[in-house]
Image: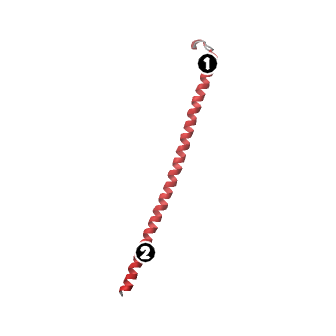
Amino acid sequence: MSDYTREVDELRDQLNRCRDYIAELEAKCRDLTEKLHEAELAIEHNRHLADEEQLRGALRYRDGVIHGLKYATRCNGVSGGEVDQ
């Protein structure tokens, strides 16, 4: 085998190794992209849950204020023991 043939074979082997390495990197990139997408979905889901919890808290506060105002209206300056429920 001539030096030229050996050099060509070595270059082909090196090219094949590079192609294999590139394929591995592309597979890792696809895997990481998929994981990133899953993480983004989880963040969006958690943000939605946090928004819902904040709304529930605001509704509880509003309901409490309404209940307090109704009670105050019934009391009309009278002490609590004398107020009809």
Quick one: label 2, few (<14), some, or many (20+) residues within 10 Å?
A: few
Residue 76 place in picture, x, y as percent: 63, 14
Of all residues shown, which one is farthest toward the bottom?
Answer: 2
First-in-chain label (1 vs 2): 2
At 57% from the left and 14% from the top, the residue drawn is 80
The local secondary structure at tag 1 comes to helix
At 50% from the left and 51% from the top, the residue drawn is 39
For the N terminus, the quadrant is bottom left
Apparent side of residue 2 relative to residue 63 in the rendered image (left or right): left
Which dot marks residue 72?
1
For the C terminus, the quadrant is top right
User: By what rule are the colours in the image chosen?
Assistant: secondary structure
54 vs 43: above or below:
above
Quick one: label 1, few (<14), some, or many (20+) residues within 10 Å?
A: some
Residue 38 place in picture, x, y as percent: 51, 53
16 vs 45: above or below:
below
Towards the viewer: 81 or 18 = 18
Residue type (three-letter) at the residue carrying disc 2: Asn
Which dot marks residue 54?
none
45 vs 13: above or below:
above
Q: Which residue is mark 2?
A: 16
Residue 54 place in picture, x, y as percent: 55, 36
At 40% from the left and 78% from the top, the residue drawn is 11
How many marks the image carries: the answer is 2
Residue type (three-letter) at the residue carrying disc 1: Ala
Residue 64 place in picture, x, y as percent: 58, 26
Mark 1–mark 2 distance (CA, rounded to whole Å): 84 Å
